[in-house]
Image (cartoon, helix red, strand yellow):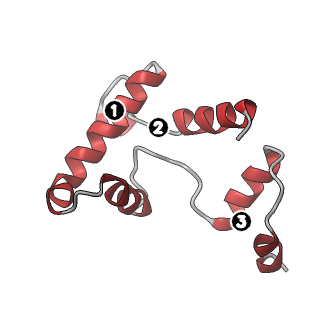
Amino acid sequence: MKKEMREKIEQYIISHIDSEYYDVVTNTAAKKLAFLEKTFIQEKQWHLDRNANKQAVFKDWLQGLPACFTIEFMNYKILELAKSWGLPARKSDRKTRR
């Protein structure tokens, strides 16, 4: 992945971490990421205790659309976002949009 694209994705992720409803001030990227991780662990500790695969538990948590991480989740919105970044559509994505 090109450095420019990686930076766009990182900026998107950072800008969609929202601590407003948690009464926490996150005014830097590092604080936002720490807040996201802490919130994830607090909300899914029971699941982490039963499952050693932290990545799988994080995926499960994201699928629940946590209020603190407001990324796009609908396929067409994700495809529009990727297109706006200049990423080419995959053949499988083009077929589903017809």
Callout 1, which amino acid? Answer: Phe
The quadrant of the rendering that contains the C terminus is bottom right
How far, Cα to Cα, is label 1 from label 2? 8 Å
Contact between marks 1 and 2 (CB within 8 A): the answer is yes
- Direction from residue 79 to residue 22 in the image, left or right: left
Q: Provide the secondary structure element on which disc 1 rests.
A: helix
Callout 2, which amino acid? Answer: Ile
Spot occupied by residue 44 in the image (x, y as percentages of width and height)? 23, 54
Contact between marks 3 and 2 (CB within 8 A): the answer is no
Q: In this rendering, is residue 83 above or below 23?
A: below
Callout 3, which amino acid? Answer: Tyr
For the residue carrying disc 3, how many other residues have a C-alpha within 10 Å: few (<14), some (14-19), or many (20+)?
Answer: few
Q: Which residue is mark 1?
A: 35
For the residue carrying disc 1, how many other residues have a C-alpha within 10 Å: few (<14), some (14-19), or many (20+)?
Answer: many
Spot occupied by residue 76 in the image (x, y as percentages of width and height)? 71, 65
Q: Which residue is mark 2?
A: 17
What residue is shown at x 36% (from left), y 60% (from top)?
Answer: 56
Disc nearer the start of the sequence (1/2): 2
Spot occupied by residue 93 in the image (x, y as percentages of width and height)? 76, 71
Q: Provide the secondary structure element on which disc 3 rests.
A: helix
For the residue carrying disc 2, how many other residues have a C-alpha within 10 Å: few (<14), some (14-19), or many (20+)?
Answer: many
Q: In this rendering, is residue 4 above or below 49?
A: above
Disc nearer the start of the sequence (3/1): 1
